[in-house]
Amino acid sequence: MSAEFKNLTADDFEILNAQDWSFPVPIAYGPGRLAEIGQKCVDLGLSNPLVVTDRGSSDLPFIAAVQTYIAQVGLKSGLFFDISPNPRDDEIGAGRARFRAGGHDAIIAIGGGSAMDGGKSICLTAHNDIDLWAFEYEQAIPKIPNDQAFPKLITIPTTAGTGAETESTAMVTHVAKGMKFCVWHPELKPTLALLDPELTLGLPQNLTAWTGADAMTHAIEAYLVPGFNPLCDGLALEGLALVSKWLPIAVRDPQNIQARGGMLVGSCLAGIAFLKGLGMVHAISHMIGAEFDTQHGLTNAIVLPVVLRFNLPFQEFKVQRMAQAMGLRDSSVAMFIAHVEAVLDEINIPKALSDIDVPLSCAQRIAEKAICDIAAGSNPRQASVAEIRALTEEAITKAR
């Protein structure tokens, strides 16, 4: 038995068992459970769901599998995949048009974070003529008439990173402004989140690393958000424990189904936790992604150490709790940051945003946009435009 398997507990082996959870939405977890999607649609009274994914996933086997399983129970389905890595408002409009033209009655969002965000955003607008940006998080919540209720929404993540499968929040690029904004509505909740770790087995090593680092960032930033929220804090710490344990193994051994399961559940928990809020990593990353179309998890991963050095002084108690969750003996701020950087090194995250072609000349512009991001408002240490510019410049030139 390998050293990795000698360290496994009984709970680790239960990662291979099918589980049904009811919080915060119905969740069906377990290897091979994608095969149940047809019957799940029947049970929900659906007749013609629209499968929504991103351009990069449209030809992958899981898309054909979903539509085959739906057809096997006698239902129709359609497919919309005109979604960018950073979904755009014009693409959401095209998706709404496809939903209506096809006479669809539900949305199945399957893929990574862009597919989740695209599917949820289309859901927000599918049955009404409300402008997408009326659903922006900081705007007054639109009233939805009973006869325009949101269609049922099924979410199926195929990466272990975004944790976007249990809520209605979605990040969308406002093309005219060149900025990302969060859209949502409290009445839109996924009817079912289906978590099948087998869907992540084919994920390339770099995407496993990037999306996994995204989950780690979610857990850390959510836990550092100020305020009394023991529910989200508990989920953040457990999500961090799972991700820190399984991420290096998933990158090193891509066919390890236990690692894939642990990562998928850890990502889900971290995604629930950030209902509490996020922080400056995301505020900067959102605007970098909107302008340069960078991969979100990768951008977060590069920026993370820079923001930790800014945020963690005077956060010793929370650092101690996070260090314990990650299994560290030394819970000092310096050692915690060093460990996070070591994990990023181990999974081959670039050391600067310049390595992914983000120019230094954008720093002022990114800072002016980032301070408007909702995540900047929940960062544990408030920052000025000048301070955000300095953080951005450091992330571009040498993040670690």
Image (cartoon, rainbow, N blue to C red):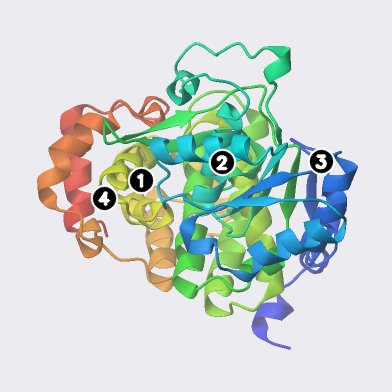
Secondary element at tag 4: helix
Q: Residue at x 58, y 37 (%)?
A: 120
Q: Nearer the viewer, mark 2 or mark 4?
A: 2
Mark toward the start of the polypeptide (4 vs 1): 4
322 versus 167 height, above or below: below
Q: Residues within 10 Å of mark 3 (few under 14, many from 20)?
A: many
Q: Which residue is mark 4?
A: 292
397 versus 182 height, above or below: below
In 3D space, how far apart are the residues under numbered discs 3 and 2 (Cα atoms)? 17 Å
Tell me residue 396's x, y (percent): 20, 53
Residue 98's disc number: 2
- Looking at the rendered structure, the kind of residue marked 4 is Phe
Mark toward the start of the polypeptide (4 vs 3): 3
Q: Is residue 327 visible?
A: no
Q: Nearer the viewer, mark 2 or mark 1?
A: 2
In 3D space, how far apart are the residues under numbered discs 2 and 4 (Cα atoms)? 27 Å
- Looking at the rendered structure, the kind of residue marked 3 is Leu
Q: Residue furthest front?
A: 101
16 versus 92 height, above or below: below
Residue 308's disc number: 1
User: Which one is nearer the viewer's eye here, 233 or 216?
Assistant: 216
- Looking at the rendered structure, the kind of residue marked 2 is Arg
Tell me residue 160's x, y (percent): 58, 58
Q: Which residue is mark 3?
A: 46
Secondary element at tag 2: helix
Q: Residue furthest left?
A: 361
- Looking at the rendered structure, the kind of residue marked 1 is Leu
Mark toward the start of the polypeptide (3 vs 1): 3
